[in-house]
Amino acid sequence: MDALAPLEETRHRMAKVVAASILVPGLGHLLCQKRQWALSWFVLCQAMLFSGLALAGYTQLDYGRWFGLGGMKLVYLLIPEMGNYIGTHCAALMYHSIERGGMTPEVLPFRYLGYLLSAGSGIFSCFAAAHAASFALTTAEPSPRPTTTPGQAALAALLFPGLGHWVTGRRFKAYFLGGLVLGLFLFGMFLGDFADFDRQRHPYYWAGQMLGGPSFWIIGFLTSPLRFSEVMRFQDAGLLFTTSAGMFNVVLALDAFHRAQTDWLHRARHREGKE
């Protein structure tokens, strides 16, 4: 099946709702007149962000940085939380880390869970943008036989590697690509003695690992009590593999979105041809 592209007007609308969703989770859905979805995404992302910050004593803010002009704070950079841009920006203005940049370390029993929740908020916000863009597409070009929407395919890919291709009917790709991503992640964790998924030790690698979605997060949470017993010979390779797996999962999500979009447009325009 040849790839089809949305109409230019539809592409502009999709870009608009994506930008709105990154700014405020749910705003893109509101532009598409999907008020219940808008409220659901907004509440989910903000609840995850602020509960995660509270559980970790706002120590996530030690990993962020303000950018501004003339002493004025304009943009707060904290990856991946800033996918939920307004929420993260407001949190950085209102709160301060109890560790003050690491100067006063604290024992926080729910630190790891807090990191997962706040970072997950930013990642879910980005996928909320894909979900909103999908509504913009399906509203502009309705299909006579509704099937998996691009937004649903992207969200499925986030939930589990390969699931986005599975729900679009591409079972071989789901098994093959999903298996590669999950296998790469597990092999990397093995090389790091299952103790490499840690924001405190590897904050930049950790941001990439988080892109693997909830399946990666659960594995990281279950192995979080583990600590290095010795210097691992292949630790750096393990970090590279686990981080690459997270990034590859984003590629799978983009591909699932694109293929679901092509399927949808094929059905929509096939109907127009008949009419």
Image: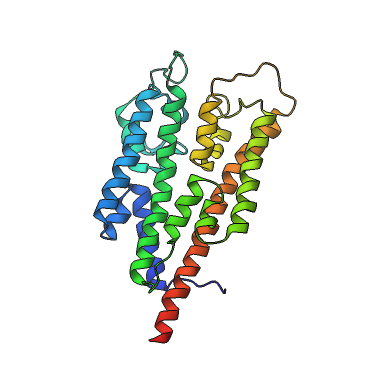
Q: Residue at x 40, y 23 (%)?
A: 56
Q: Position of residue 15 (x, y in %)?
A: 40, 61
**167 left or right of 188?**
left
Vertical order, 17 against 143 (above or below): above
Q: Position of residue 137 (x, y in %)?
A: 38, 66
Q: Residue at x 35, y 25 (%)?
A: 54
Vertical order, 222 against 152 (above or below): above
Q: Position of residue 185 (x, y in %)?
A: 62, 38
**200 left or right of 15?**
right
Mark yes or no: residue 103 visible. yes
Q: Residue at x 61, y 28 (%)?
A: 196
Q: Residue furthest right?
A: 233
* Quadrant housing residue 72: top left
Q: Residue at x 36, y 72 (%)?
A: 142
Q: Position of residue 236 (x, y in %)?
A: 69, 31
**20 left or right of 256?**
left
Vertical order, 149 against 236 (above or below): below
Q: Which quadrant is home to the C terminus? A: bottom left
